[in-house]
Image: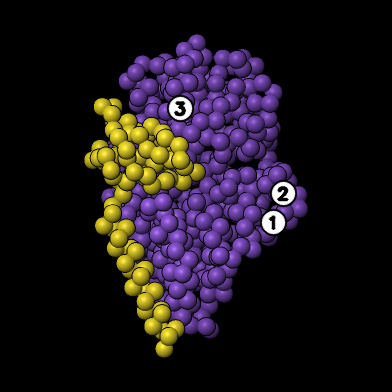
Chain colours: A yellow, B purple
Amino acid sequence: MCLAIPTQIQSIDDRRMATVVLGGVEREVSLVMTPEAQVGDYVLIHTGYAISLMDPDEAQASLEAFAELAAIQEGLEGG
Amino acid sequence: MKYIDEFRNPTLARKLIAQMRRAIPAAAPPIHLMEFCGGHTHAIFHFGLRQMLAGQVALHSGPGCPVCVTAAADLDRAIALADAPDLRGRVILATFGDMLRVPGSHGTLQEARARGADVRVVYSPLDALALARQHPAREVIFLGVGFETTAPGIAATLLQAEDEGWPNFSVLSLHKLTPPAMRAILDAGEVALDGIIGPGHVSAVIGSQAWDFLPREYGMACAVAGFEPLDILSAIAALVAAARAGAPAVINRYGRSVQPEGNPAAQAMLERAFAVGPAMWRGFGEIPASGLHLRESLAHRDAARRFPVAVTTRPEPPGCRCGEVLRGVLAPDECALFGRVCTPRAPVGPCMVSAEGACAAHFKYGDTILA
């Protein structure tokens, strides 16, 4: 029920409705809850509304942390 | 897909698991965690994470499946709105697809539809408002089910209906708040836990700091997690570390989507449309201050007030132990009906209906191993 999908904003009209592609299908979603979102940004879509503007720096930081942990583990497995 | 595929890397996942296994001494008792959210339950089973952590980390499914915790009496009322003789033909009941097969006391919405009730499945509450525009002579009632993730969209749609002046759009709000349910579980003390995997998309709205009461009042660690394997494993690793160090805290492991303060615009929508009041939860009974009811200013859009219907609710089906499953007290396969009488094809209780229900996840993916 709380499933939300990250997707990129293709365009925004003057009612803050955005065009996005969800599962290969173009849809209109409301950006009324992400007032700062712009074309090109990724937002989390839930039941036709963007509920969160995604933070690319935080995503990168998480991935780097995973990679670092994996490297430590590789070192342990190798040694 | 960006923000999904890279968080599903199986090689990295295996390394994280190996590291976690190494961090927990072999003789140590297992660390007990609850994943609150049904989306996490589904992902944990889908990716086979339980089996990969077995023996060291025990995962208990919580009540975070809105369909599952909808009380039979509330569902009976929803079905009556679509199916009562004086309303049939006048009402279009719109709801999310998950709700169709959930059993009330006298059957499901799907069965009511087969009898001729006008029940429509929509992807978004905005689609229900579009139905109200298309059918100005009919009453469109949206059956609103869901937690803090879903309720802001319903709030926004209600406010839009108000702005656009469609009098024939109303909502039966069965929306519920998650922190009071978390408190109810911990207050009951029926399941011993070392930490909680916090719901990611609920937290995108209410903020990770909404869980600060867990370490402060209950000494319980909470790691907010996304829904991909690396997200969940990283949250579990954080909870294992917190439990071993005896240092409970709220840890946000879903920083790409969750801010400490949440989404202020979504919270403002909730505030404008809803007032907090008691709600009935399947498995729990009434939990105070856990439901979202339409504000007085929107009373004319409150389907419960506009269309009073009489319902007689029967006790739960004999043998169904969904309530205990929802409280994390009972594992699905400990229920005598599981897999024999109760299957996804012929579900007895709601936990077997919803894809996010613990019983359905257990049935579908019981023995999956991460590929």
Res. B341 in view: yes
Q: Are marks 2 and 1 in contact (CB under 8 Å)?
A: yes
| SS for dot 2 | loop
Q: Which amino acid type is marked by label 1? A: Cys
B276 to the left or right of B306: left
Q: Give the crowd class for mark 3: few <14, some 14-19, many >=20 residues within 10 Å.
A: some
Q: Position of residue B28 (x, y in %)?
A: 51, 81
**Chain to which mark 3 belongs:** B
Residue sitting at the far left = A36
Residue ID for mark 3: B127
Q: Chain of mark 1?
A: B
Asked if both marks, 3 and 2, belong to the same chain, the answer given is yes
Viewer-nearest residue: B186 or B262: B262
- In percent of the image, x 56 and y 36: which residue is there? B97
In three-dimensional space, the C-alpha distance between marks 3 and 2, rounded to whole angstroms, equals 33 Å
Q: Is residue B187 above or below residue A5?
A: below
Q: Amino acid at mark 2?
A: Cys
Residue type, label 3: Asp
Query: Which residue matches tag 1?
Result: B335
Residue at which label 2 appears: B342
Query: Is residue B227 rendered to the left or right of residue A71?
Result: right
The local secondary structure at tag 3 comes to helix
Q: CA distance from mark 3 to mark 1?
A: 38 Å
Residue at left offset 76%, top offset 53%: B340
Q: Quick check: B157 above or below B278?
A: above
Residue B160 image point, x, y percent: 35, 24
Tell me which label, 3 or 1, sits earlier in the chain: 3
Q: From the viewer's perspective, is B365 left or right of B159?
A: right
Q: Position of residue A20 (x, y in %)?
A: 37, 38
From this viewpoint, which residue is outermost toward the right?
A: B340
